[in-house]
Image (cartoon, rainbow, N blue to C red):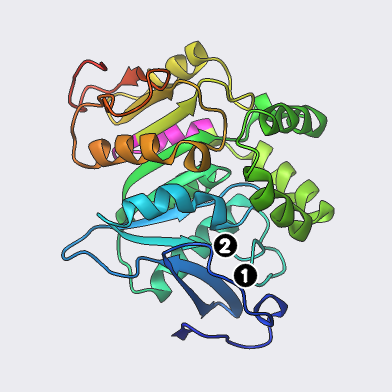
C-alpha cells in the first residue's frame, strides 16, 4: 500500500485539476486495490490525538470539512471519502455497513493509525458503531452526529420524504456540495445501501459499546425520533453515553453548525461539562438530553 499527494492509477476523478475545497491537505492513497481520496491536517499538532471524520449516505467527506477544519487545530485530523463515495474509487460489494467499517479500518492501517476517535454524521454513525464492534481496541471515543438508519427511516419513500424536509432546513449552500455527490453515487447504489442501512442493528450495537460516546442531535432533524425516545434509548446504557440536543440545527450539523459542534466535541474530548459558548447568537443553545454516570456533570447555560 502506498501514498502520495499526487495521482495514482487511472481513476477518472483525478484527470482534471480542481481548486482545493479545504485548508486541509488533499491526498490520495491506494487501499485494498481501491484509490482512496482523503484530507489531512496540513500541520499536525505535537502529541495530538487522531480524529477521523466519517461521512453520511451517498455523500463525500466534503460536507464534513467546516467542523473538521476547526478541530484540525487540536487533533491530527483525517476526512476520507470511503470506497464508492465521492472521489474515491469503487469496489464491488462495498455497499453495506460492515464492509464500510472494515474499509475505515483499512484506511487507518494505511495511514499507520493504531487508535483514533471517530466522528460520524448520519450513515457514518452506524459505520462507527460497527467499527467499534469489530475493532474495540482501535477506537478511543465515538462522536455520533445525527445518527441515521433503523425502523424510523423505513420504508424508502418515508426516508425520501424525511430527506426532502431536511433539505429546506439546511443552508442553501449545502446543495452545492450534496447534489454532485448524490448524482455521482447513483440510484442503484442508493437503493442497495438504504436497505443495508435500515436493516443494520444500530441500537443493539450501541448498547454494546463500552467507550465514551457523544451523541449530538439537531432539534429540527426530521430523520430522528423525538428527544424523549432518544432519552429512553440512552437510559439503557449505564455510563458511557452523553446526548446533547443542538437548538436550531437539522441533520447536517457538521456543515450547518461547525463552531457549535466543534465546541461540544472539544469539551467532550477533555471530559469537561457541556456549556454554551457566550459568543454564539442567542438562538443557538445546547441541551443535555442524557448524561451517563461516568460523565462530568454541569449545567448548560
Q: Which residue is more in the foreground, 141 or 27?
A: 27
Q: Residue at x 57, y 85 (%)?
A: 7
Q: Is residue 17 magenta?
A: no
> Which residue does the image show at 45% across and 63% down from the upper left?
105
Q: Residue 268 occupies which quadrant of the picture?
A: top left
> CB of mark 2 within 8 Å of CB of mark 1?
yes
Q: Which residue is mark 1?
A: 88
Query: Percent from the top left, x then y, of residue 200?
Result: 61, 40
Magenta residue span:
203-213
Question: Secondary structure beneath disc 2?
Answer: loop
How many numbered marks, from 0 up? 2
Indicate yes or no whether the magenta region holds residue 207: yes
Q: Could you say whether the residue bearing mark 1 is in a helix, strand or loop?
A: loop
In the displayed structure, does residue 73 sit left or right of residue 81? left
Residue 206 shows up from this direction: yes
- First reached walking from the N terminus: tag 2 or tag 1: 2
Please say if 206 is above or below 222: below
Left or right: residue 86 versus residue 249 is: right
Indicate whether 271 appears above or below 123: above
User: Residue 82 shows which numbered tag?
Assistant: 2
**Considering the image in quadrants, where does the C terminus appear?**
top left
Answer yes or no: is residue 133 visible: no
Q: Which mark is residue 37?
A: none
Amino acid at each position: 500500500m502506498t501514498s502520495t499527494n499526487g495521482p495514482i492509477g487511472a481513476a477518472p476523478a483525478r484527470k482534471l485539476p480542481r481548486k482545493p475545497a479545504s485548508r486541509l491537505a488533499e491526498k490520495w492513497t491506494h487501499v485494498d486495490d481501491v484509490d482512496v481520496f482523503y484530507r489531512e491536517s496540513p500541520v499536525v499538532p505535537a502529541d495530538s490525538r487522531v480524529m477521523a471524520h466519517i461521512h453520511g449516505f451517498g455523500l463525500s467527506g466534503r460536507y464534513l470539512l467546516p467542523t473538521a477544519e476547526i478541530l484540525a487545530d487540536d487533533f491530527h485530523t483525517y476526512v476520507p471519502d470511503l470506497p464508492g463515495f465521492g472521489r474515491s474509487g469503487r469496489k464491488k460489494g462495498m455497499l453495506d455497513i460492515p464492509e464500510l467499517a472494515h474499509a475505515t479500518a483499512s484506511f487507518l492501517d494505511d495511514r499507520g493509525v493504531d487508535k483514533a476517535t471517530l466522528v460520524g454524521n448520519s450513515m457514518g454513525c452506524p459505520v462507527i458503531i460497527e467499527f467499534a464492534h469489530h475493532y474495540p481496541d482501535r477506537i478511543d471515543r465515538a462522536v455520533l452526529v445525527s445518527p441515521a438508519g433503523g425502523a424510523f427511516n423505513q420504508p424508502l419513500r418515508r426516508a425520501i420524504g424525511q430527506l426532502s424536509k431536511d433539505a429546506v432546513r439546511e443552508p442553501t449552500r449545502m446543495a452545492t456540495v450534496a447534489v454532485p455527490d448524490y448524482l455521482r453515487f447513483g440510484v442503484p447504489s442508493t437503493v442497495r445501501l438504504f436497505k443495508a442501512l435500515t436493516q443494520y442493528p444500530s441500537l443493539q450495537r450501541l448498547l454494546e459499546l463500552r467507550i465514551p460516546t457523544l451523541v449530538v442531535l439537531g432539534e429540527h432533524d426530521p430523520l430522528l425520533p423525538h428527544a424523549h425516545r432518544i432519552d429512553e434509548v440512552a437510559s439503557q446504557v449505564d455510563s458511557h453515553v452523553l446526548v446533547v440536543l443542538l437548538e436550531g440545527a437539522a441533520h447536517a450539523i457538521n456543515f450547518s453548525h461547525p463552531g457549535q459542534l466543534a465546541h461540544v466535541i472539544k469539551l467532550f474530548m477533555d471530559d469537561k461539562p457541556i456549556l454554551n459558548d457566550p459568543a454564539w447568537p442567542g438562538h443557538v443553545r445546547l441541551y443535555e438530553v442524557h448524561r451517563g454516570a461516568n460523565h462530568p456533570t454541569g449545567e448548560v447555560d
